[in-house]
Image: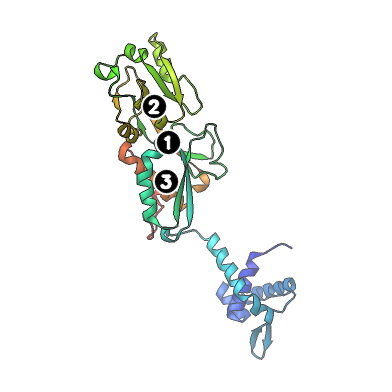
Amino acid sequence: MQLDLNLMAVLDALLEEGSVTGAAERLRLSAPATSRSLGRIRRLTGDQILVRTGRTMTPTPYALEIRADVHHLVAQSRAILEPKRTLDLGNLQRTFTIRGNDALTTAIAPHLLTAIRQAGPGLSVRLLAEADIDTNDLRHGRVDLEISSTMPTLPEINHETLGADRLVVAFHPDHPCADAPLTAERFAAADHVIVSRRGRTEDPIDVALKSLSLRRRVVASAPTSTAALHIVSQSKLLVVVSERICRPTLDACGLRIGTPPFDLAPVPVTLAWHQRYDNDRAHAWLRNRVRDSFAGFLGHRPTTGADAAEAGPADV
């Protein structure tokens, strides 16, 4: 049997109005069209639904039994199909999932979690570690947002650059580099730890050194910036990290920083999401809160047209 949702709307109106004429006026249909729909409903259900008693129509016992359910189903269908005009965060029950590396997560978490806690009691967030392999979690809806330094390649993934952060050399205050200018030769002569989620022991810095006919010794690779900075805080190693993004950990570890002795491109911060969420007001609200979180230390807050329309009167 092929389901016709229009019949549910007609049935709801018939049960509410108690007459074909009243239902037709309510639905802005002609009385003959409404009468034909009633005939179809009778054939489908095997019940008269409304029976004439004198000058009025009376619902059958079956009609009385299903009236509340029919009304509820029609109301639910309308709620699903009608566009949301406002965003009521105070009553929203939703868990957002954000994936990013540890430094980015550490940088945005305080501001973002404050916004989520203030917005509504039913909101929460899952902060996932950056995967060591490329995944399709955005495509399959397992992740709402990804924050990284790379651009997505799938056409259905939207993205924007939130800003960029310069790279600096971090070291212990007692490191020899703390007391002398950090030349390329001194940089190459030191021992290093590098950040690589895949365990690589070379990165673009080695290419820059090679162009100067220099090589460095990489003693270790660490999967995250936080791990690498903690290693540096207890050793005489150097590590190159993003300055403002890693500032909380740099300060917590009591490390000093210097300018690399060669040109390194700033690291972009990219926000990515699946296009299915473009018109999702709650998701747009989340994107704007992430932008706000980064704006404090990256100094850049882009806004797209879709996201500017996130708010209704109940938005926070």
**For the residues carrying marks 2 and 3, which lies nearer the camera in this image?**
2
Q: Is residue 302 visible?
A: no
Q: Residue furthest top?
A: 213
Closer to the camera in the image, 46 or 92: 92
Instruction: Give the number of the disc on residue 231.
Output: 2
Q: Is residue 276 visible?
A: yes
Give coordinates of residue 1: x percent, y percent. 74, 63
Q: Quadrant of residue 71?
A: bottom right
Residue 55 falls left or right of residue 89: right
Q: Amino acid at mark 3?
A: Arg
Give coordinates of residue 228: x percent, y percent. 40, 27
Instruction: Give the number of the disc on residue 102.
Output: 1
As drawn, 274 above or below 163: below
How many neighbours does mark 3 have within 10 angstroms: few (below 14), some (14-19), or many (20 or more)? many
Report how far apart the C-alphas of labels 2 and 1 lie in the structure. 15 Å
**For the residues carrying marks 2 and 1, which lies nearer the camera in this image?**
2
Closer to the camera in the image, 38 or 155: 155
Q: Residue furthest bottom?
A: 54
Q: Quadrant of residue 39?
A: bottom right
Residue located beneath label 3 in the image: 287
**For the residues carrying marks 1 and 3, which lies nearer the camera in this image?**
1
Say whether marks 2 and 1 touch (CB < 8 Å): no
